[in-house]
Image: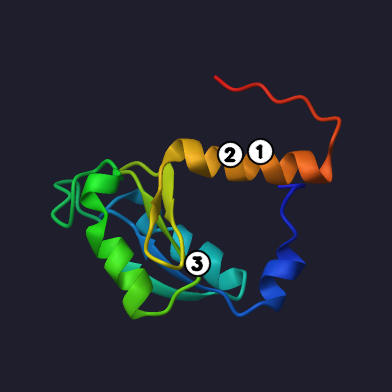
Amino acid sequence: MTHIDSNLIESKPFKVVLDLGNGAQAVTAPNFCKKLNCEVVLVNEQVDGKFPGRGSEPTPQNLSVLSKAVLENKADFGIAFDGDGDRSIFCDDLGNILTGDKSALILINHILKKNPNSWLLLV
């Protein structure tokens, strides 16, 4: 968490759409975002192991509802989680789904700008 400036996040009025995929993150992600002063819009927020809202994997093919919700709510971005909450995929403010490799490149770019001599191991 040393790379996250929570004060900066809290100072901006971010609006985020969370597609919780009817999974485990429905319990924690909304509260985490609200503690960071984000306005939160929820999609598939009811925990249900049958995953009725979409498949449990957050793939670009099953995230059209997230993309639409980001656009309709004029959100800054969206996040979709897999069923057990250990993976996520992002959506930009234009409704474009960012695949995992694109998200990783954005994160790597951020880390290297802050710490140019960092070593990164990608597996």
Residue type at mark 1 is Ile
**Image quarter (top left, top right, bottom left or bottom right) of the C terminus:** top right
Which residue: 77% across, 47% down?
A: 2
Mark 2 or mark 3, whichever is nearer to me: 2
Residue type at mark 2 is Leu
Please, what secondary structure does the residue beneath circle 1 have?
helix
The residue that disc 2 covers is 105
Q: Position of residue 79 (x, y in %)?
A: 42, 57
Q: Which of these two is toward me, 40 or 123?
A: 123
Q: Position of residue 3 (x, y in %)?
A: 74, 48
Which residue: 68% across, 73% down?
A: 10
Q: CA distance from mark 2 to mark 3?
A: 27 Å
Answer whether labels 1 and 2 touch (C-beta < 8 Å).
yes
**On the rendered structure, is 41 left or right of 10?**
left
Residue type at mark 3 is Asn
The residue that disc 1 covers is 108
Q: Is residue 62 above or below residue 122?
A: below
**On the rendered structure, is 95 left or right of 2?**
left
Q: Which of these two is toward me, 16 or 30?
A: 16
Please, what secondary structure does the residue beneath circle 2 have?
helix
Please, what secondary structure does the residue beneath circle 3 have?
helix
Number of other residues with Cα within 10 Å of mark 1, as a class: few under 14, some 14 to 19, many 20 or more? some
Which is nearer the N-term, disc 2 or disc 3?
Answer: 3
The residue that disc 3 covers is 31
Mark 3 or mark 1, whichever is nearer to me: 1
Q: Position of residue 60 (x, y in %)?
A: 29, 46
Q: Position of residue 92 (x, y in %)?
A: 46, 61
What colouring does the structure picture have?
A: rainbow
**On the rendered structure, is 71 left or right of 38?**
left
Q: CA distance from mark 1 to mark 2?
A: 5 Å
Answer whether labels 2 and 3 touch (C-beta < 8 Å).
no
